[in-house]
Amino acid sequence: MSSTFSGDETAPFFGFLGAAAATLFDWLLSVKGMGAAYGTAKSGVGVASMGVMRPELVMKSIVPVVMAGVLGIYGLIIAVIISTGINPKAKSYYLFDGYAHLSSGLACGLAGLSAGMAIGIVGDAGVRANAQQPKLFVGMILILIFAEALALYGLIVGIILSSRAGQSRAD
């Protein structure tokens, strides 16, 4: 049996698992209530509840929902970067590369998961508090920005880790 495959046979499994983890933790765990889905759902409930009291503030209070939705894009970016780096027939793909891609996906995905939970909790409480005291809006936005920064840090770490793939051996 001849094969043109070069590198480790199981390495692409870990690479694709990293791509899946990046998207899974960020936006596909709506059943578990985590990540961007959790942030969107939790903030959306707060917006709906607040809209009953102060309907004129609904559009202003949609910010947490939008910020939670952006988290899914971070996972998509890492998944595309990882999947374009996996082509074992064109270039050797070793376990080091697979583990680099797996860690890249996990870093981005778990950071997005944490940020989504933070945005959901802050967004829910923030829009309800904003309905009662409009001066709290700026404070809520600042807290949401810091929560979003957690996911951005995960994206940056994911890009750095993913760039390490392909440096395992001199080909």
Image (spheres, rainbow, N blue to C red):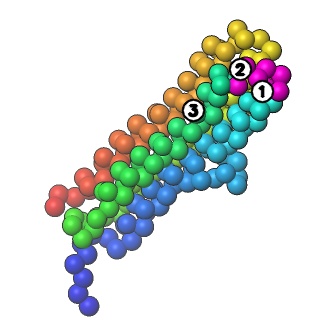
Q: Which residue is mark 3?
A: 67
Q: Is residue 16 visible?
A: yes
- The residue furthest top is 135
Q: Quadrant of residue 113?
A: top right
SS for dot 1 = helix
Q: Which residue is mark 2?
A: 57
Q: Which residue is mark 1?
A: 51
State whether residue 95 is above or below residue 3. above
| Residue 135 position within the rendered picture, expressed as x and y whole percent measured from the top left | 70, 8
Name the chief secondary structure element in magenta: helix
Query: Of 63 and 125, which appears nearest the observer?
Result: 63
First to last magenta residue range: 50-58
State whether residue 129 is above or below residue 90. above
Please give the name of the residue rendered at 79% of the width and 26% of the height, measured from the top-left corner.
50
What amino acid is found at the position of numbered circle 2 in the picture? Answer: Leu
| Residue 62 position within the rendered picture, expressed as x and y whole percent measured from the top left | 64, 29
Q: CA distance from mark 2 to mark 1?
A: 7 Å
Is 55 in the magenta?
yes
Is 37 in the magenta?
no
Q: CA distance from mark 1 to mark 3?
A: 19 Å
Which circle's residue, 1 or 3, is located before the other in the chain? 1
Q: Is residue 110 visible?
A: no
State whether residue 42 is above or below residue 134. below
| Residue 111 position within the rendered picture, expressed as x and y whole percent measured from the top left | 54, 40
